[in-house]
Amino acid sequence: MANSAPSIERIFSITNELQFNQLAIEIFHFQYSHNKVYRQFCDLVHIDPIAITYYDQIPFLPVEFFKTHIITTGEKPSAIVFSSSGTTGDQTSRHHIVDLRLYNESFKRGFELFYKSPQELCILALLPSYLERSGSSLVYMAEKLIAESGHPDSGFYLHNTAELLQKLRELSASGQKTILLGVTYALLDLVEQQSFHFPRLIVMETGGMKGKRREMIREEVHELLKKGFGVASIHSEYGMTELLSQAYSSGEGLFRCPPWMKILIRDTNDPFSLVLHGKSGGINVIDLANLNSCSFIQVQDLGKLHEDGSFEVLGRFDNSQVRGCNLMIN
């Protein structure tokens, strides 16, 4: 069993499948040894840690545990606690972060892998539903990327829509490469007020109507946004409170992970079995940056994995579809 954590640099130096597997197995043993909740879960599902030799054999902790338990590996105190959004009365997820360096390194390196240096960009954030509450990991990430951008127009736009519209017109005229990061309903609200022709604009939606609009399928949303902003494709970010890494899509709903993150697809009727490429099922996430919480998480999204490693997010489980997730939840 691993008694000490691997170095942060090893996590972000992965270049191939062998390195990923070796580190995933090492982190599994470290978390099994030092994460009480994860160990109890593994024992309840009768996992023999010695028998695990490949990452697809590792058990995935249901994401609901972040609502009902403190998920930490080791005894170090939390530096910050990120929390999920939720409607009144909902129980929210809480991710206790022991070492912020892991999150800082993960989102910066991941962003640069897909979009190069923030210093080359103007970064505009339209995240009203997140800015109006504390503890958002997305707002934390956006704040750091905006600061690193250094562009005078980079920033958050909450209620000052008129200013944002003016900035977009000016940036379009100057040819400045720009990212507009926003929740889906706010982006749709924006293009209803004014349309653009801004081919260099990267529009990145983070998902969610937050009860503000009717739910729409991705293709319908993206067509409206492409037409409204005058762009060829709509980018997306796949992340969540319980993860320290993000996958990104540059269009068509196909996401790709950084080298220290991996997606597997489980059978919807048997959460302990995986399905083949091209088959839909529940999404399991390996996030090796989650070193001090849990790196192996079974989330409530439905998805499909392709042979080239890209994946799609097809929707959400409803409560009746969640099986095998309530062993320890009370």
Image: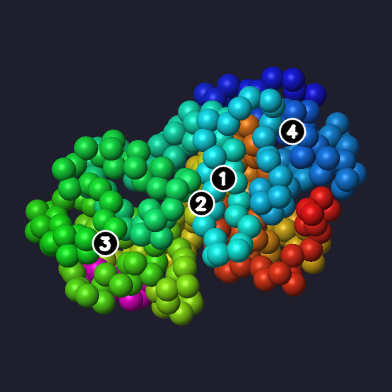
Question: Residue 66 in magenta?
Answer: no
The tag on residue 35 is 4
Q: Main secondary structure of the magenta part?
A: helix
* Labelled pair 2, 1 in contact (Cβ < 8 Å): yes
Mark 2 vs 3, N-terminal side: 3
Question: Residue 227 in magenta?
Answer: yes
Q: Which residues are magenta?
A: 222-230
* Labelled pair 1, 4 in contact (Cβ < 8 Å): no
Q: Residue at x 51, y 51 (%)?
A: 239
Q: Secondary structure at mark 1?
A: loop
Q: Secondary structure at mark 4?
A: loop
Amino acid identity at mark 3: His
Q: Residue at x 68, y 64 (%)?
A: 281
Residue 311 percent location from the top left of the image: 55, 58
* Labelled pair 4, 2 in contact (Cβ < 8 Å): no
Amino acid identity at mark 2: Gly
Q: Which residue is mark 2?
A: 239
The N terminus, quarter of image: top right
- Residue 292, by quadrant, is top right
The tag on residue 243 is 1
Q: Secondary structure at mark 2?
A: loop
